[in-house]
Amino acid sequence: MEPRAPAGAPAPPPLTVLLVDDRPENLLALEAVLDPLGVRLVRAGSAEEALRWVDDEDLAVILLDVQMPGTDGLEAARLIKARERGRIVPILFVTALDRDRRRVTTGYQAGAIDYLFKPLDPDELRGKVAAFVDLHRLQGEDRERRRRYADRLVHSSEARYRQAAADAEWARAALETADRTKNEFLSRMSHELRTPLNAILGYVQLLDLGVLGSVSTEQHTHLNRVRQSAVHLLGLVNEILDLVTLDARGVGLRVVREVGRLDEACEAALALVRIEAAMRNLSLAGPGAVTDARYLGDPHRVRQVLVHLLTNAVKFTRPGGHVALACGTSDGADDADRTDGGAADGPPGPGPWAYARVEDTGLGIAPDQVARIFDAFTQLDGGHTRSEGGVGLGLTVSRRIARAMDGEITVRSRPGVGSTFTLWLPAPTVGDDDASAEALAPDAAAGGAAGAVPERWYGEVAMLG
């Protein structure tokens, strides 16, 4: 969304995105996907034409096809980065090639920020372009914003001495500005930190696979430590970004309502934590027999919550322990044994409900600390808990996601015995099986916290081929 100009002032021109591809039909498809962003889209059918745009325009981001006749995308990226105006412009490579590691490495060396593989996902394409466009806009506005903010402070200080009511209004506006600035900063920095962290993980993987030469056992050990540290840091960044998106000061999270199978969600989540469980010498059990348990909710968000609950269970269970994930349905609820803090493990209200239950043989949680575990930036006392790291956001984000889908997360725990966390989701009733992706969230224009890229885009065009 373009920034609103002051009354009487001309609206700022839209930011420019350069699309580079030798095939006109691909350019048309890219324009159709990116049109809802409200940016200025310019075309180049060759590397030479692209360089002229770089010299003449202030570009927010470049989408560059890798395979072009003559000067291909890799060489074009090197030429762009050699120019003064192109040095800091982010380049997203678009390619239909297989994800060959050597070619990906060459692309990053040529100056690419990221790869987009065909067939393109419209959500992913718009999300990445929107993030870089917003960042470019913020950089350009930063100096002017500081000047305007200083002017407002001076004006408000003078008005404060003349009228008490105007002083109160200034204080309110300052608090709102600080809150928006905080969310803007956290969101932008989280997006920016994820790009180099993903690159670090990619290069570590290339080194560990021996692509650049043989790796000794000791080197493999050190590379694994680097990978674990980068994955841990990436998890913290993602949790902060999720918390900003879920900020309760205005709008909620935008999710969709779809009928999904819980066993599929469980298996997808288990696949992402099996390696970590094996490394910690834990047994990890899944639902076992096929179940027809179905839920109403957002499949991506359901998987995200289950991965966090499983990761938490693995993290706080000692070697040799056991973690199990089960799923099923429940027709009713017994509110008598459920506290407001979610201390019991029963359904949160009248059914029908679908549930996914994560049970571990870990450290457990003391009764007086159960109500605190869902508070943001809360870590329970204890040396082992502290040694596992984290900033205490995962359960906060997970519960907010569950509630955005009209569900809940409950917990039952005994110190020294283990914990059981249960994700409850509405179960479909008659007629729900025919429902397609229906928005569950607030006003679509809200889209999340200030400065955040919207979670989903609707009204898609066909996937690019």
Image: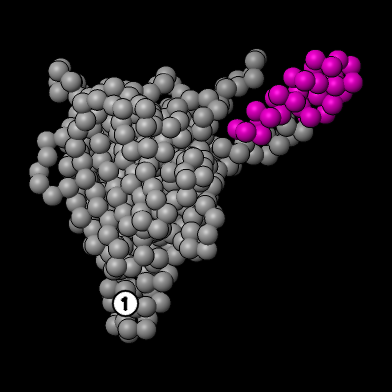
Q: Tell me if residue 8 comes above or below residue 77 in the rendering.
A: above
Residue 413 percent coordinates (x, y): 38, 48
Taking the spot 40% from the left edge, 65% from the top edge, the residue there is 228
Q: Picture quarter containing residue 150?
A: top right
- Image height of 457 relative to 388, above or below: above
Q: Secondary structure at mark 1?
A: loop
Q: Is residue 114 left or right of residue 184?
A: left
Which quadrant is the C terminus positioned in?
top left
Q: Position of residue 331 (x, y in %)?
A: 21, 26
Task: Spot the residue most to the left.
Answer: 290
Residue type (three-letter) at the residue carrying disc 1: Leu
Describe the colour scheme in one phrase.
Answer: one colour
Task: Identify which residue, 101 or 338, lies in the foreground.
Answer: 338
Picture residue at 65% right of the left edge, 15% below the top: 7
- Residue 164 magenta: yes
Residue 143: x, y in percent? 68, 39
Residue at the spot of label 1: 212
Number of disc labels: 1
Please identify the residue farthest to the right as the structure is shown.
161
Front-most of 114 and 178?
Answer: 178
Q: Position of residue 209 (x, y in %)?
A: 27, 73
Name the residue located 47 percent from the left edge and 50 percent from the top edge.
366
Magenta segment, which residues? Answer: 151-180
Q: Is residue 431 magenta?
A: no
The answer to which quarter of the image holds residue 126 is: top left
Q: Measuring 17% from the left and 47% from the top, which residue is drawn there?
A: 287
Compared across the picture, whether 369 is left or right of 68 comes to: right
Q: In the image, is residue 192 above or below residue 331?
A: below
- Main SS of the magenta part reads helix
Is residue 82 at least partly visible in the picture? no
